[in-house]
Image (spheres, rainbow, N blue to C red):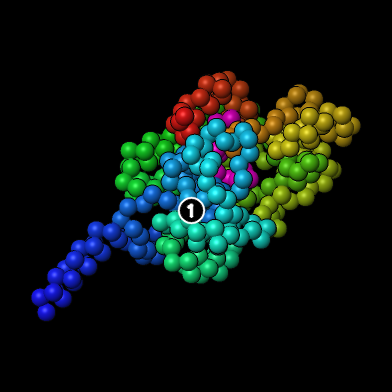
């Protein structure tokens, strides 16, 4: 009996020391290890948040890194590729996940088919924490969660501070903005520039924090976005600025008689979305949108904020220190 009591005491002490529970963004109680050193995120935006917080925490990547991304991600560059859930039928490699055995898995709870995905991940015996990723505002919760998981609240607070500063930036500039005409834009996606995002698409969210108006009035047909738009509709909308995702399209737009009739082309306001280390606007819609908001404000209202190259240095020093 005495030996049994001692064993029970040791077991309970071990359990209390090496396990804890948290409530995730969807109200689920999840039991997690007391010490967390390896995290796998099942979608690129969440993985990039982990890289910014601490690259050594990354247990696996969602996709192979491009050459220009490697200098920014530190030790995460050496991690295996496990895939993930990021639309168009993509799923993770469960064998890789079973091999690397992350301490926890972060999964975007709002994605289509999340319950089926959750059951498959739970089968691995690894705790799954479901998080919000519907809005740029959700970065605050993501960084806060990473601070709680690792105990590094100082790092979390630094990233949260920059996030909140950026989301409130345009509102803080209202007195200066009043003297400017509100800019209309067309967000050109695809190699022909004839795909875009409609009202309600979270791919457009950075534009909402930049004080410009979408020149195109259209409706979403799916969460994926990239809605096809006719050239005629674009000509009728005649945007002040074209924000292009595809370099080849943007560099050839002046050669087209139809595109060159637009004000944005005539005034040389066709801009290519920066994508180093990751795309500033979308695909994936990551924390880079914070830099995207500032780039858009500068693109729509030049000289309203400090030079973007200067801000880029500050951003990278905070999010991707080398």
Tell me the residue at 48%/66% (across/down). Answer: 124
Q: Quadrant of the N terminus?
A: bottom left
Region of the chain picked out in magenta, as a range: 281-295
Occupied quadrant, residue 34: bottom left
Residue 232 on image: x %, y %: 84, 43
Tell me the residue at 13%/74% (across/down). Answer: 3
Q: Which residue is mark 1?
A: 40
Residue 63 on image: x %, y %: 61, 48
Residue 50 on image: x %, y %: 46, 45
Tell me the residue at 68%/58% (across/down). Answer: 88
Q: Nearer the viewer, residue 6 or 195?
A: 6
Q: Nearer the viewer, residue 196 or 234?
A: 196
Residue extending farthest to the bottom is: 1
Left/right of residue 118 with respect to residue 88 in the rendered view = left
Q: In the rendered image, is residue 178 in sight?
A: no
Q: Is residue 293 magenta?
A: yes
Q: Is residue 291 magenta?
A: yes
Numbered disc total:
1
Residue extending farthest to the front is: 3
Residue extending farthest to the left is: 2
Pointer 1: residues within 10 angstroms few (<14), some, or many (20+)?
many
Occupied quadrant, residue 154: top left
Q: Nearer the viewer, residue 39 or 164?
A: 39
Residue 2 on image: x %, y %: 10, 75
Q: Nearer the viewer, residue 199 or 318?
A: 318
Identify the secondary structure beneath mark 1. strand
């Amino acid at each position: 009996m005495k030996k049994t009591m001692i064993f029970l005491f040791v077991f309970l002490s071990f359990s209390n020391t090496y396990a804890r529970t948290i409530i995730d963004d969807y109200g689920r109680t999840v039991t997690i290890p007391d010490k967390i050193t390896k995290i796998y995120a099942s979608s690129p935006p969440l993985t990039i948040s982990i890289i910014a917080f601490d690259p050594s925490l990354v247990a696996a990547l969602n996709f192979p890194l491009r050459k220009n991304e490697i200098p920014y991600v530190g030790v995460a560059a050496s991690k295996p590729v496990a895939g993930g859930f990021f639309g168009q039928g993509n799923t993770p490699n469960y064998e890789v996940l079973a091999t690397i055995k992350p301490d926890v898995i972060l999964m975007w709870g709002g994605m289509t088919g999340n319950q089926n995905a959750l059951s498959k991940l739970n089968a691995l015996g690894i705790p799954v924490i479901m998080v919000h990723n519907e809005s740029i505002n959700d970065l605050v919760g993501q960084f806060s969660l990473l601070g709680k998981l690792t105990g590094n609240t100082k790092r979390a607070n630094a990233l949260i501070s920059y996030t909140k500063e950026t989301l409130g930036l345009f509102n803080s500039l209202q007195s200066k903005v009043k003297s400017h005409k509100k800019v209309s834009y067309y967000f050109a996606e695809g190699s022909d520039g004839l795909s875009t995002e409609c009202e309600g698409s979270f791919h457009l969210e950075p534009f909402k924090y930049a004080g410009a108006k979408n020149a195109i009035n259209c409706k979403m047909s799916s969460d994926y976005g990239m809605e096809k738009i006719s050239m005629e509709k674009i000509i009728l909308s005649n945007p002040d600025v074209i924000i292009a995702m595809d370099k080849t399209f943007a560099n050839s737009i002046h050669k087209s008689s139809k595109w060159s009739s637009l004000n944005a082309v005539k005034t040389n306001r066709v801009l290519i979305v920066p994508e180093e280390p990751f795309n500033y606007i979308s695909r994936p819609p990551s924390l880079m949108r914070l830099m995207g908001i500032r780039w858009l404000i500068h693109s729509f209202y030049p000289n309203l904020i400090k030079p973007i190259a200067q801000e880029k240095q500050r951003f990278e020093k905070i999010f991707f220190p080398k």
